[in-house]
Image (tube, grey):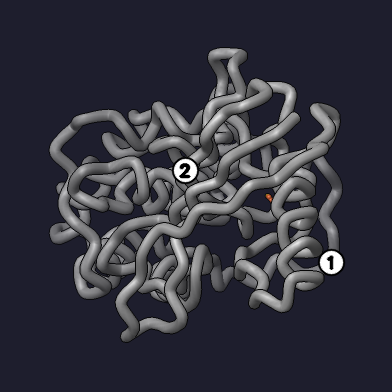
Amino acid sequence: MRLTLKIWRQRGPLEEGGAETFQLDHVSEDSSFLEMLDMLNEQLNEEGIEPIAFDSDCREGICGMCGLVINGKPHGNDGTGSNTTTCQLHMRTFNDGDTITIEPWRATAFPVIKDLVVDRSALDRIIQAGGFISANTGSAPEAHAVPVQKSKADRAFEAAACIGCGACVAACPNASSMLFTGAKVTHLAELPQGQPERWKRALAMVAQQDGEGFGGCTNIGACAAACPKDIPMDVISTLNGDLRKAPSRV
Ligand code: FES
C-alpha cells in the first residue's frame, strides 16, 4: 500500500515543532505500525534525511514504551473495537492511499524530547513516591501461606495489567494521570502485603502526581476508553476512597 504520513518533527525540547509530510510505498499490510516507521526511517537514511525518533522496546504490548497519537487517538484504532498498543497495531487496519497523522503524547508532564519521543519519567517518580511495599517477604512462600480472597486477587491482577504507557494521560483533556495512579494504588491495596503502607502510599503518590503537573480527574472517562490494557475507571474510585480514609490512619 501507498501511504501519506504527516509526522510531528521537533529537534529538541525547546525547539518549535511542526508536521512534515512523507510518502511511503510498498508497505505490507502484514507489517506492524512500528515496522512501517522502520521502513520510513530506512528510506530517510538513504535520502540523507535524519530518521524520525520514536520509542519502542518489547514490541509485544507488554513494556509500555511505545506510544503515539495516530489519527488523533492514543495508540491508534485497530478496528476491532478494543484497544491495543502502538506496537501491536498492524497496517491491515489502514487502506491503500490513506493519510495518517502521527503525533507524540501531548501533556505538560510529558515534555517532547525529540520528534515522537516524550519524557515519561514523571510516571516513574509517582511509582517511586509509594508504588512499592517494604515488607520483607523473604524467599518464595508456599502459595497458600497468605490467603487472598479470589475477588481481591482478580482485582489486583486487573489493576496490575497497567503497563505505564501514558495513553490515559494523552487521551484525557485534563492530562490527568489518575487512571495510572489508581491502577498502581489498587493493585497493592487489594493484597495483604500492601496494607502496612496503604494510606501513606495513596497520599504520597497523589502528591507526587500533582507536583508533576498532571491535571485533575473530572470523570470524563477518556482514559479508560484509550487504555490498551482495559484498566477500569473504578480504580480511581479506590484511589479516592483511600485518599479520603488516609488522614485519620497515617
Ligand atoms: S514496545 Fe513494548 S508495549 Fe509497545
Question: Where is residue 95, by image quadrant?
Answer: top right
Which sits in the foreground, 206 or 137? Answer: 206
The answer for how far apart the CA atoms under marks 1 and 2 are is 50 Å
Q: Residues within 10 Å of mark 1 (few under 14, many from 20)?
A: few
Question: Where is residue 75, by image quadrant?
Answer: top right
Q: Indicate yes or no: mark 1 CB to ligand 1 under 8 Å.
A: no
Q: Nearer the viewer, mark 1 or mark 2?
A: 2
Q: Is residue 68 visible?
A: yes
Q: Position of residue 187 (x, y in %)?
A: 51, 45
Q: Position of residue 193 (x, y in %)?
A: 57, 55
Residue at horizontal 35%, vertical 37%?
Answer: 223
The residue pinned by badge 1 equals 139
Residue at horizontal 84%, vertical 33%?
Answer: 28
Which sits in the foreground, 30 or 67? Answer: 30
Q: Of the numbered discs in the image, which one, if any, rests on residue 95?
A: none
Question: Where is residue 38, by image quadrant?
Answer: bottom right
Residue at horizontal 39%, vertical 74%?
Answer: 129
Q: Secondary structure at mark 2?
A: strand
Task: Decide: is 34 above or below 49.
Answer: above
**Residue at the outermost front position:** 47
Q: Amino acid at mark 1?
A: Ser
Dot 1 or dot 2, earlier in sequence: 2
Residue at horizontal 33%, vertical 57%?
Answer: 106
The residue pinned by badge 2 equals 101
